Image (cartoon, rainbow, N blue to C red):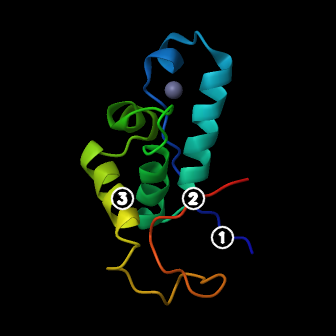
Amino acid sequence: MTSRTEIKIHQCECEACKAGSDLEIAQRHQQINLFLSRLNEPQRRWYVGLMSQQSDGPGDRQLSKITGLDEKTIRHGRHELESGLADLPHDRQRREGGGRPRAEKKIRR
Ligand SMILES: [Zn+2]
């Protein structure tokens, strides 16, 4: 495979990254954007929507700066997750496990 696709990685625009004050945060944000660059459109907003649900995580506005996604897009992704991605075709998603009765599910590790 020699096809080279140029992937544009968003440069985080949050205060910490712009100021270069916190390398750890900058690195994490860079990794988030690297990861996002490999996802397709809906996957991107689901992931960011997921991040926006963490109570100790960044809010929509902050996430928008970090990822370059619209706040509206982030909200949209969150709603899609809340509704169990019901509007989306299943054909390209892998289903794991058996029945998943509800969208609400606690992930414990
Ligand atoms: Zn940042």
Nearer to me, 65 or 54: 54
- Amino acid type of the residue that numbered disc 2 sits on in the rendered structure: Lys
At 57% from the left and 12% from the top, the residue drawn is 20
Q: Which mark is residue 3?
A: 1
Q: Nearer the viewer, mark 1 or mark 2?
A: 2
Nearer to me, 67 or 81: 81
Residue denoted by label 3: 77
The image shows residue 83 at horizontal and vertical percentages of: 34, 70
Q: Quadrant of residue 45 in the image?
A: bottom left
Kindly report the distance in space between the C-alpha atoms of the residues bearing marks 1 and 2: 40 Å
Question: How busy is the neighbourhood of tag 3: few (under 14 within 10 Å), some, or many (20 plus)?
Answer: many
Q: Nearer the viewer, mark 1 or mark 3?
A: 3
- Amino acid type of the residue that numbered disc 3 sits on in the rendered structure: Gly
At 44% from the left and 45% from the top, the residue drawn is 53
Nearer to me, 38 or 74: 74
Nearer to me, 3 or 78: 78
The image shows residue 52 at horizontal and vertical percentages of: 43, 43
Q: Quadrant of residue 65 in the image?
A: top left
Question: How busy is the neighbourhood of tag 1: few (under 14 within 10 Å), some, or many (20 plus)?
Answer: few
The image shows residue 93 at horizontal and vertical percentages of: 54, 81
Instruction: Assign the N terminus to one quadrant of the image.
Output: bottom right
N-term mark: 1 or 3: 1
- Discs 1, 2 touching: Cβ within 8 Å: no
Residue denoted by label 2: 106
